[in-house]
Every structure is written in C-alpha cells, then in structure tokens.
Amino acid sequence: MSNTKAFNICDTLRKRLQEINNKKEDYQKKINVSSEQLQKLFARGGKSSRQTPEQLDAQIDELEKKRTSSSLPLAQEKEILRQISQIKKAKVQYEENKVHEKAIQQKKSEISNYRTELTTIKAQIAELEAALSKVELADRLGCTANDLKSHMMECPEGKLGQVIGKGGSNIKKLENKTGCLIDLDKVKSQIHLQGNESSISKAIQEIEDITMAIEVEMKLDQATLSFLFSNHMTEFSSLQKKYPNVIFDLSRETSMLKLRGREEYVDPAKEEVLKNDVTMQSIETSSRDAALIVGKSGKTINRLIETHGVAIQVENRKDDMSEIIVSGLQNQVVEAINEIKDILFNNEDMEVSLLVSAMTRNKLLSNSGLLVKKLQKDVNAACQPGNSFVRFEELPKEERETSSILLVKSPRMHIKEAEKIVRERIEEYDSAVLTMQIDLDLIPVIIGPKGATIKAIRKEGGDGSDLEIDKFSGEVKLMAEKESSREKMKSAIDAIVSENQIMRLPMEKSMFADLFGQSGKVVKAKIQNNGVFMRIDDSDTSIILRGSIEKITEAAEDIREFIASNQTKVFPIDNDDESFLSRRNGLVKKIEKRHNVRLNLKKDLQVVSIKGAVEGINDAEKELKKTLFGGDGFTVEKMFVPNTVMGAIIGKGGKNISKYESDFDPVMVTMHSLSFCLSIRGPSDQVELCRRKIAKDIVECKVTESIQIDTEAFSKLSQAAQTSAIGGLPVNLNVSQTSVRLRGAFGDVQEVMKQVKELITGTCVAEIFLTPDHFEKTSKAVEDSSKFEQICESTTTSASLDESLGAVVITGKRSNVKRAKTMMLGFLETVAPTGIAKIKFLKPLLKSMGSSKDVAKLSMDSGCIISLERDICTFFLQAPSSNQLKDGMEAVESTIKECMKLTNVFQVESWLLQYLLTKSVESIEMAKKECDCQIELSRNELMISISGKEEAEVSKAKSMIDTMMDQAKKENVFIDIPESSMNEFSGTSGRRMRGLASKYGVHIDRVKKTKSRIHIQGSGQSLIRAVNAVNEWVANWEKKNGGVTLVIEEDMINHVASESSILNDIQKEFGVKADLNKKNCSVTIRGGKTTATREKASLKLESLMQEISEKDGKGGNKENEVIAPADSNTTYVNGEDPISKAPIEEVEPPEMTQKSQNNAIGSLYNLLVSDDVASSVIASDVQEWDSSTVSSGLESEIESPETGVSYYRSASGFHVRL
C-alpha cells in the first residue's frame, strides 16, 4: 500500500512540475513578445527636441515680432517664415515623442511584471524538483523519504578535483555505484551526502579511497607503451582487472602511466608493470611490403599479433617507405620479427626476362592480347595467390621487329613455377615456325606494293598463319599450326624467288652518275624495257640486277659495254688552277675536241674529271697537266701582285692582261684575285720575258696611298717633314689635318709609307716579299724548323707569314727589326740556296743606286727578281733557277763596283769626326765646291763618304780631308795614366791639372766616362812640352808607387773591365789599389801593407783569370805573364814597352800608306756587308790611333744588343766602341 502511495506521490509531483514548467514557458513567451515590441518602439522613435513647448513658443513670438515691427527685405522675411515653420514642426514632433515615450514606459512596466511572475514560478519549480528528487532517491534506495539522511564530510585540500573527476565523471560513477546523492561545496571543500545509512556508508568508503589515495606516475618507454596499447589494449585491460582498487590512467601523448589508489594496492600494480621484459624492434620497408604484412582487412597483422602476443604498428612515411614496429616481450618480439622477414622474403617480387621472337610476340598479342591474358590466368591459377604478371617489355619499334622480351613477374615462392609455364607455352608456339633464307633485294618483291604479295601469302596459309621477314639478314619465318599450311606458304615464296634472280655487277662509284644520268639514259631504258630491275648497291661498289637468268645476263653485257666507253679519270687542282680553267673555256673545248673526251671542272671538290675512252683520257690528261703545271718547254710562272697595283696590272676590262698576252704570244696570263697571285703560262722564253715586263711595271707603277691620321699624328708628321725625317725618295707627300697622301712609284711609295706609319705608331714594320714558290718553301720550313722563332726571340721582334702579301712581315723597334731582317734574309738563303741570295753594300752608295727605276731595270735585264732593302743596304735576289740567280748576282755586283769607283768611304775616330764637324766646316764646304763632290759625315756610322762625277775629283777631295785630319791629330793627344794616380794628378778641384795646362799653354781635360785617360789639346812645341811633362810626372809617380804588374791576354782584358767586382773584391780583401790599363792589357797592384800582400793579391787575380778562361773554354797562357818585384819597374812581355816613357822631341802624325788605306777600306767593306750590323761602328785595326779614344763631348754609355760591347754616345749623336 505504501509503494503505491509513494508511486502516486511521484506521479503527482511530476504532473504538477510539468504544469508549472508549461506556465513558465508561457510567461517566457510573453516576455519575448513584449521585448520585440519594445525594440520596435525604440526603432520608431524620432529625434526629440531639447527645448520645451514654452521655449519654442517664445522663439516664434520673437521671430513674428521681428517680421512685423520693421520693413525687411523679401529674402529675410522668407527666411524668418521658414524658421517659424521649422519651430512649429519641432513643437508638433515634441508632442508626438511625448506620446511615444509614454507607450515605451508602459511596455517596460509590462515586461517587468512578467519577469516577477517568472521568478516566482522558478522558485516553485525548484521546490518541486527537490521534493521529487528526494522521493525518487528513497524509491531508488528502497526506503521511505523519512529514512533518508544527510551527511557532510570534509574533503582534504587538493583532493576535491579527484573526487569530481574529469567533467564530473567520478561523481557520476560514485552515485551510480553507491546510489547516494552527492553534492559538493567547492568553496568550503565539503561533500554533502544524502541517502539511507548504508548508501552513505558506501559513499564515505569510496570517497575516502579517493581522498586517502596516493598517485604514482611512471614514464614508460616506447616499447612498453606500444605493448599496453596493442591488441585493443588487451594487456592494459588485464592489469585493470587484476588490480580493481587501482585507477590506471595511461596517456599515449605523454607516455605517462598514472596509478592512483591506496598505497597497499598501488605498489603491487607498479611492480607488475615494471617486471615485464618489454622490447621493441623495427623493420624499414616499402609501403607495398608494409601492406603485405598488414594483409587484407588487417588479417595478416592480426594473426601475427594473436600468435606472438606482441604489438605491431605500421607507420607510413612521405618517401613511399614504411616502418614496421614490433613491441612486446623479448622472445615474442624475436619470433614475430623472424616471421615478418620470412613473409617479406617469400613475397619479394622476382622478374625473369625471356627472349621471344617477333612472330611469337605477334601471335601472343593478336586478338587484343587474348593469348597473353590466358597465359597470365594460367600462371596465377598455378601460383596462388594470383600476384603474378606476364607482359612484354617496351622496346623501340626497330628493335621489336626482330625480337621482344617477355617479362614474368611473380613472388619468390612462385617464380620458378611461373617461368616454367611461360617457357613451355613459348616453345609450343616456336615449334610451329618454318625458317628459310632469301636475298635482301628480294624482300621488296615478296612484300609487294603496299604489302599485297605478303598478304596473299599469309592468306594462302589460312587462319592463324603469319609470315615475317628480317630486312637485315633476309631470314623468312613462316608460322602456322598445320604443317601443310607452312608448306603452301614456302612454295609461294620459292616461286617468286625463281622469277627474281639477283646479279651483282662490280662498278666504280664514279660510273654511277653516268649510268643513271644523261649519258646512260639509252642503256638504262633498254634494260628496264627488258623487264630487269636495276639499282645501286648500298655499299656503292656494284650494280644490282634483278630478273630471270637470261634477262639479267643480257643486261650485264650492256652495262659492261657502257663502262668501257665511259671511263673517268680525276686529278686535283688548286684554287689558282680552277680560276684559270674557269676563264679559259676555249682551251677546255679544244682539248675535248682533239681527244674526244669530256672535261668537267668540279669547283666544290677542286678536281678535274676527264671522261671518255682510255686512250683519249690519257692524251687529254697529259695536255691538261702540261698546261696547268708545265713541262716539255712549257712553263708556268707564278708571282705575287700587291693589291695596290693589281688594278693597274689588269687594266680596264683586262686590257693590260690582253696586251701582255699579245706582246708575248702565245703566253696566257691569269690574275687570281683571291690569292693576289698572277700566273704566266706558255713557252719558257716568252714566259720569262713577260714576267720581267710585269715585274718592271709593278715597281714603276704610279700609285696613290692615303693614311688617316689624328691631330697628334699630324703634329709628328709636320715636325718630321721639316727635319727631313721622312721622304728622301721621289714621292709626292701631302700631309693634311686628317690624312697623309702619297703619290709615286709603287716601290718608293711603299718605303715612304712604312716610314710614315712608324712615325705615327712608333712601331717599325718590314716586309720581305717572296715569289709564290719561295713563299711555299718558307711556310714549310717554318713548320719544320725553330729557326724562325729563334730569330724573333733573339731580336725581340715578332714575325709572321702573310699569305695575302706573299711576304714575311717583321714588326718591332727599328733597330731590332733591322737586325731581324738581316738574320731573316740569311735564313731564307738556307731555305732556297739555289734561288735566294743577298748582297750588302755601303750605305753612302744608296743614293747612287737606290732608284726604283734602276732596280727595276736591273731586275728586268738580269731576269732575276731583285728588291732593294734600303734600311739594311742590301739587295735581295730571287730566281727560279741557280743560273738566273747567278746572273742577277753578277749584275748587282757589277753595279756596286761601278758606283764605288766614284765613291770613297772610310771610317774615322769619334773625336776626329767631332773635330771635323765643329772646326773644319768651312774647309769641308770649300772642298765640296773645289772638287765638285758630295762629302757626307755620318755620326752614327763614324764614317765619311765622298762621291763625285770623276775619280780624280773624288781623290782630290779625299786628300783635302786627310790634310784636315792630320792637322787635328797634331793638335790632340790622349794619354792613359794609372787610375790610382788620377786624383793626385788632378789635384784638389783639378787645380794641379789646370796649373799644368796654364804653364804650357794647352788645354787638359779628363776624358769623361773613363778613369785613367786625359786629353791634351794644343799646338806646336807647347803641346810637345806638355806631353813630356805629363809622361815625366807619371814616370816619377810610378817609381814612387811601385807595384806588381800582371799582364793579361787581350781577349781576357774585357772580362776584367766589364766585371768591375773582380778588382773591387781584390782591393777590399787585400787593402790594395788595382790599376787597369786596357791599352797595355795589364793590371798593376799597388799599395797594401807589405810586398807579400800585393803578391797575394796578384796571385788571387791570376787565379780568377784562370777560372774565367776555363769557363769560356780558353786555355790560359802563363808563359806570357811575368810578375815584377815590388821595388822594380814594370816588366813587359818580350821586354817590349807598349807605351814609351822617354821624352819626345816632336810629335808627328803617323802616315798611312796607300796599301794600308786599301786594306782598311777592304776591312771596312767586309764589316759593312757582314750580317753583324753593329760591326759597322768598329774602327779599322790598321789605324795607329787608339780607336777607344773619345772627345770631351761624350755624355752617356750604351751597350750594343748584338755583341754586348759598350759604346759611348755623344751629344751630337755619334757612337764609339770601348
């Protein structure tokens, strides 16, 4: 009865609660509707005025008064009326806003009343819910409401959260487990329990288990973590079941395991976790293999997990790789890993390549690959599961025509079985193939037009038949399932072969063009009309004939007859020969007509082909080669023509060429513009005459050259023109601000133009023009010899062969270029010793024999090509034969001898030349007028040249010059004194020397750049007394300062003079003074502490001289050396004193006999014409005056680059060797 009654109470309370909730919803709806209406009232409200109606009325009255009390402009009155209207509108708006505001306030009051009622309803609901909860709790606990009790318990600080749990989960668990209603006061940290006595006791027990529990955190390694999470957390669930009083909290993100419970429960659980020997191993594999381990729907991996009790995790990576991670107990992991490896190994894909013929391939791929698909199906059926594949490898089309590769792919465990099945199937297909061999040239016949023949043969074999031809080997394969079908196809092919026999007729490649061209048109038509197919073999060595035996035999005979009458011979030509034949069409036609042949000039190949009968070809070839290359009295001469004169030599429209040919008929003259070369062909005598005439015309040809210049170059050329630095030849030179214009003979213009360019650029350019034959020989010699490079290196120049000029071009400084040019001419003589020669001459002869016309005439008369190299005073001769070269040399030497009869050249000492240039100018001018001769004094060569019209006049002028030189020698004396005495002789600031000069009325100077030479200038007895006084002073000084004298060979004295460190080292080492006397070839050791010191110094010097002599390969000659005692006078070899110390009564100039003069001139000439250019400044040995003496005007020292000999350059520009 009580249960029914309780049940009714709950039902009644619920109904009542439902009614009040409905009422609550009604009031909530009313509040929502009224709130929406209130928002609309807010939205409709206008802008209210801030002024009251009374204030607005006052404004209206004031404006009306202003309008009516005075007269206003219409505009102002309208403005006032507008303002009054606005104020009245604002007054009306104020009244409307007042009504609107009243409606808003009423609506707010209405909403407030609804909310008050709603609050009352919510309180009633709370009371009903509390009552209903109490009744339901009692009902759930199986007691009455009066049996319910309440209990409050304190919760330790920090434990309240654990009691609540995440999202209240623990509270719900406790309520469900104990049936007690639990409420928490978080502020006071109190827990309120409501229920009967037993449920409250259970709740207190559960809560105390939480509040009195400890918490242990364990950091798990990855292996243990994976193990607990594996297999749907089976291991973790078993732990939870084994220790129900412990709360396990496992986090994969932090790898932490939290154990919470009373200490007596937590410790065993912790030990259980730690005692597991969990490990982890991984295998890296491809994603495909990883999928194999997972299996279909995870079947394989689940089996591994259940079998071995391990956790298996597969992690995919971005690089199409995966990692299989196995974790669990040690022995279980090892077993699982081994099984995984076995699975991967057995399921590894293996591939086998099988070579398949093209015919078998076509059969397998026919009908959309039906047989291949069937083959793969059979393989998969035998090799379960079906992971095997059969496919053809992709190959280029040309490779597929011969064979193909069939790929069989299957897991390792099935690959052998799969290969066996495929091989058996291929062998089955290959057994149905018949092979036969045909000629390659029959392949197109068997294929037929657009494949018609081969299609007919296949049709003959029936369905499933195939025919394949290898176009490289000529192998024919026939495939058919029935043997009869294969035999039918073979018979059809045999029939075609019998009607198409092949013959190969050997033929030279040159004949192909004739046979298949216009020449063989008739023969070719005859053969083809006879039903024979003809073509050129791919190897270009034969003609292939195809047809029946009878027909191809007849065609072969026709071709042999054609070959016999159309022989061809080819020989090469160069560009010049090709140019000649192109312009001589008439000559070609005459040869063709005379010998019944055809000549064909092939410019691209640079050959001439002759076609015809063998006899005619040989005769035509002989005549053509004679014309091109000479022979049998027919000569071909080639000569370079400078581009500047090419137009003049050719003439307008070839007029001059035609004139040469008419004047020297039957000569043929051809100009080759590409090579700047002219060829002359004809009889030898006429060719030679024509060549001489052309060479003369080239030299005498009047040309005009222009050179563009700038302002700086114009300034240089203007100064050079004023000082006659350029010109000297019959060339019209016109210099303007922007250009230089030269007009004259070609040879003269080229010479002056080189000088002009040298002045502008500072670089000298020399050209040695060669004949074509000599140019070709020189080119080969340069390739095979290093002499060319040696010349450039030794002279510091650059040289090259200019094919367009046909010349050797040398560039560099003028002095270096001259040396290089001389050496180059010597080199060219060795290149062509029978065709090249050079002849040097004295520079003063240049004017009398240097005219371009004279050189051209000399060249024409001698038949030798002669050029004048003005800068090195040399004639350069070239000839095609040794006889012509000899004639040219004789002509040049004869010309030189004739010029030398009227020219006297001799060399003088530098001081003597300076004396004549300064003190004998008037006398020299007088001699010029009196003898009607040209007298030139050259500072550079230390040379005097006298030229005139008569020999007597030249001899007279020479006598007058000798008289001037004799007078100079009487007035000038040079004396060498010991070097160590020079300071004492000069005295302080030269006082003693000046006093001596003043005493005897002479002039005494030290010769500059020397250490021991003085120059005494005076006349008569004053000069004699001064010389005696100096000699006496020197004798006394030497007596007072005795020493040891070492006489040195003449060829060794220069070593001592040039190596000043030798004497300096001895002087420092022994504390002595070493005086060098080059004239006497001796060294005197003076000073020192003792005689022994001087002797040691002399022995040291002797030893050094011996070393130098051995180093140079010269044996020392000690027999000519005598060391004098320290207290004795100097002793000389053989008792001869080269410098007499006795007083002289009178100084007479030495006389030179006519014989000695001739010897001197001859020696001088030999020096001038030698290859050593520098030797032209060395004085003759027959002169008694010391060639090393110099005047007081010497200023600087230079060194000859050829010989290494030192020279002095005077202020006036002349040089003297030391």
Image (cartoon, rainbow, N blue to C red):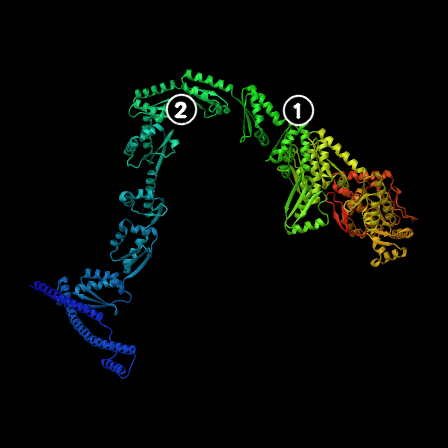
Residue 1011, numbered label: none
Q: Residue at x 19, y 68 (%)?
A: 36
The secondary structure type at the circle numbered 1 is: loop
Q: Is residue 723 left or right of residue 420?
A: right
Q: Residue at x 32, y 51 (%)?
A: 224
Q: Quadrant of the N terminus?
A: bottom left
Return the x and y of residue 307 as percentages of the image width and height: 28, 44
Q: Residue furthest left?
A: 1
Q: Residue at x 45, y 26 (%)?
A: 538
Bin the neighbour count of mark 2 within 10 Å (Cα to Cα): few under 14, some 14-19, many 20 and up. some
The type of residue carrying mark 2 is Gly
The type of residue carrying mark 1 is Gly
The mark nearer the N terminus, 1 or 2, is 2
Q: Which residue is mark 2?
A: 474
Residue 469 placement: quadrant: top left
Q: Is residue 240 left or right of residue 865?
A: left
Residue 875 placement: quadrant: top right
